[in-house]
Image (cartoon, rainbow, N blue to C red):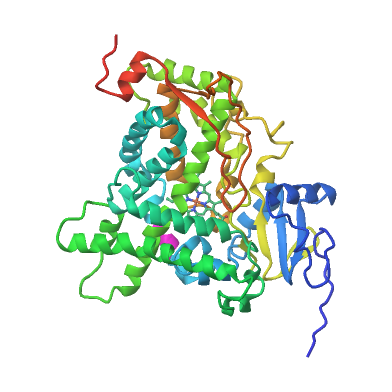
Amino acid sequence: LRVKRKRYNTPPGPKGLPIVGNAWDIPKSFEWMTYAKWGRDYSSDIIYLRIFGTDVIVLNSAKAADDLLNRRSNIYSDREYMVMLLDLVGWGGRHFAFQRYGDLWRAHRRLFHQYFHPAAVPAYYDKETQEARKLLPRLLEHPDDYMQEIRTMTASIILGIVFGMELQPNSDPYVAMAEKALNGMASVGNVGSYMVDYLPWLKYVPSWVPGAGFQRSAAEWRAATLGMYDKPFQSIKHAMASGKAPPSILTTMLSKLDPDEDNSTRENDMRHVTGTAYAAGADTTVSSLGTFLLAMVMYPDIQKRAQEEIDRVVGSDRFPSIEDKDELPYITATMNETLRWRQVTPLGVAHKLRVDDEYNGYHLPAGSIVVGNSWAILHDEERYPNPDVFDPTRYLTPDGELNKDMPDPEPAFGFGRRICPGRYFAMDSMWIAMAHILATLNVEKAVDAAGNVIEPSGEYTSGLLSYPVPFKVSFKPRSASALALIQPGTSVE
Ligand code: HEM
């Protein structure tokens, strides 16, 4: 029986072809820019696409994203079921960013929130500060590996607070496994990266069939995903049983269990929520700090101004502390601008609409994938003139205070009930690392063997997470007293 579809007034967008719809219109990379361009071409901040029968709605303005994803969050907070990512690569039921709206998601999010809400995160300042301090000498020693060193810092912070884990220097086996799992996630995590997402029966095609290479990649990634969730959980549980587990979020969680009850569901929630903190939090913060370094290399005057603020408020005989934050508005503005200028997740994580909706006279069909284009929102020329220029003063009043009328770059963290629940912790980690780097190091363009300055390309990778394309950086201690802070044994002449 064929039911004839009623023609509704959906938002404008490229026309597309029969059956495949707009599948071939969507570029393989930097889709956020194309979506923003379509918004201009069709003079609409809402764009409608159809991909193999799936409705996709892209929101290109702060107003549309706020009206729908924030204000109607009760119906806009579902997720698409991504076969490749969830079934084949193993993130289903584990990483709640990809969980459908429902009880399991709610249980995970609630448990996570208990340890990452604004009043909980100051408990992690000490660890964040300690690891930021360890980062500084490593940047001086291994300037070419600065991204890896930053990754070690974020991994040490998160794994330290969540599992009480001390990382093994150089390649830590847990981090190596997690990196593999995260590579899989980054490769398949954007809705529609794999044909199997649109044609779910493809998952039954064995991996030896020509063209089914996704099955082989999936099996390798899957082993890493399962390991990253199970291994630390099991080892902490064992260590706790013998009284040897250092205090952590997981030991606090486990200590609340009643040994006389069947705890299997709650233990699973704990395993998945703790594993997710690393999966969601490590590489995101790494990318944002990479952007910070890129901005400092490209805009030396801004770096100098930030350093002057620290010198004036903190002096040079101690490190800045997050307790100084209120007196360091330029540093906070620099962090906001870092999150605005280049997003870690330019399209956020796609939401899904659960029921039919109406907006501005348009029909938005139930089941639509709804993409908040945070790149477009944070590059809106009206709110952010010359949006491609890195300029922290956007966030400041003329007399240098934080401008209360300027919205925080919140869209960088998503929307509505799905907004990043790790954002307070993420911004603390970023702020502390940035303040430590600015206080003690000059971050400059590197020079090659022939004495030529190496210009960074300023380019980014494309995917669910976007990173600066590797660029060379030179780190130099700002002064003898800075060096003495970085390497406490060093004498100051
Ligand atoms: C600069 C760093 C970060 C950025 C830019 C970022 C960005 C995002 C974005 C865009 C989302 C999707 C929101 C949506 O669906 O509308 C998200 C979700 C999430 N983030 Fe973050 N994040 C960052 C750091 C962190 C950290 C450090 C953690 C954990 C400690 C974390 C945990 C999560 C979790 C668990 C979710 C899933 C929320 C849900 O679906 O209910 N994030 N993040």
The residue under the point 37% across, 58% down is 274
User: Where 177 sits versus 443, above or below?
Assistant: below
* Left or right of 209, for residue 226: left
Outermost residue, left direction?
242
Between 183 and 313, the one nearer to me in the picture: 183
Q: Position of residue 441 (x, y in %)?
A: 43, 23
Between 115 and 397, the one nearer to me in the picture: 115
* 161 within the magenta span: no
Q: Position of residue 216 (x, y in %)?
A: 53, 68
Between 229 and 214, the one nearer to me in the picture: 214
Q: Position of residue 20 (x, y in %)?
A: 77, 69
Q: Quadrant of residue 209?
A: bottom right
Outermost residue, bottom direction?
1
* Left or right of 388, for residue 235: left
**Magenta segment range?**
108-112
Q: Quadrant of residue 197?
A: bottom right
* Left or right of 220, for residue 33: right
Number of marks in the rendered image: 0
Q: Quadrant of residue 252?
A: bottom left
The residue under the point 60% across, 60% down is 73
Residue 110 makes an appearance in the image: yes
User: Where 223 sits versus 175, above or below?
Assistant: below
* 111 within the magenta span: yes
The residue under the point 56% across, 20% down is 450
The residue under the point 67% across, 50% down is 373
